[in-house]
Amino acid sequence: MAVNACSDGAGDGRDNPLVELVLGGARSGKSRYGERRCEGAAAPLYIATAQAFDDEMAARIDHHRARRDGRWSTVEVPLDLADALDAACADAAGRSQPVLVDCLTLWLTNVMLGGRDVEAETARLLAALARATRPVILVSNEVGLGLVPETALGRAFRDAQGRLNQAVAAVAGRVVFIAAGLPLVMKGG
């Protein structure tokens, strides 16, 4: 199913019909689902937030790259996601082409470990999403369904991720939860 571009007019405080949030647990199929939502697009943009700090993460990144064909453009953006979305939407030539952000969970990790203000960065992201003038699909982990993290940092991350997911879901025109590779539409059509 391809993402269809809608008319301009986002940013007025209501849901932006161009924004879709795809939630799920680890290995639920959310990234693959987001990629499938871009099928049929001539030149989708992939905004990657992961950083290859170790061999395991490098292998995960390679796996994701291998799934995408030559139509995709990729921009690696570990921190400045709002700026990257604004730049993508400023590109009038690509206005109808979708943007896939994979993933908010790694972006939030980078923000927290980078010592940035999570609330300020979240506000910047939400403002960019409200202004989006091309389809934006954001992939994020639902981390609140498992065990309570053992460490204070783990609990702070879980709480921040839950708040981020809620805030993005409030802006998004469509929210989909993925379990076992199957989509459950929670908001929108």
Image (cartoon, helix red, strand yellow):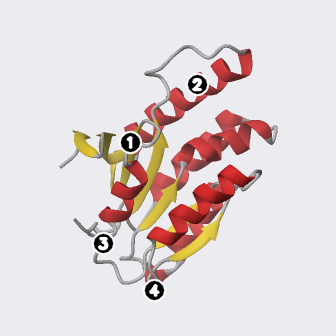
Lower position in the chain sequence, tag 2 or tag 4: 4
Q: Residue at x 30, y 72 (%)?
A: 39
Quarter of the picture containing the N terminus is bottom left
Residue 30 location (% of width, % of height): 39, 48
Q: Nearer the viewer, residue 54 or 126?
A: 54
Between marks 1 and 4, how big is the CA–CA gap? Answer: 33 Å
Write down the residue under mark 2: 158
User: Which mark is first along the chain, 4 or 1?
Assistant: 1
Q: Earlier in the sequence, mark 2 or mark 1?
A: 1
**Residue at 47 percent of width and 23 percent of height:** 144
| Element class at badge 3 | loop
Nearest the viewer among 123 and 64 is 64
Q: Amino acid type of disc 3?
A: Glu
Left of 67 or right of it: where is 54?
right
Marked residue nearer the N-terminal end (1 or 3): 1
Dot 1 falls on a residue whose secondary structure is loop
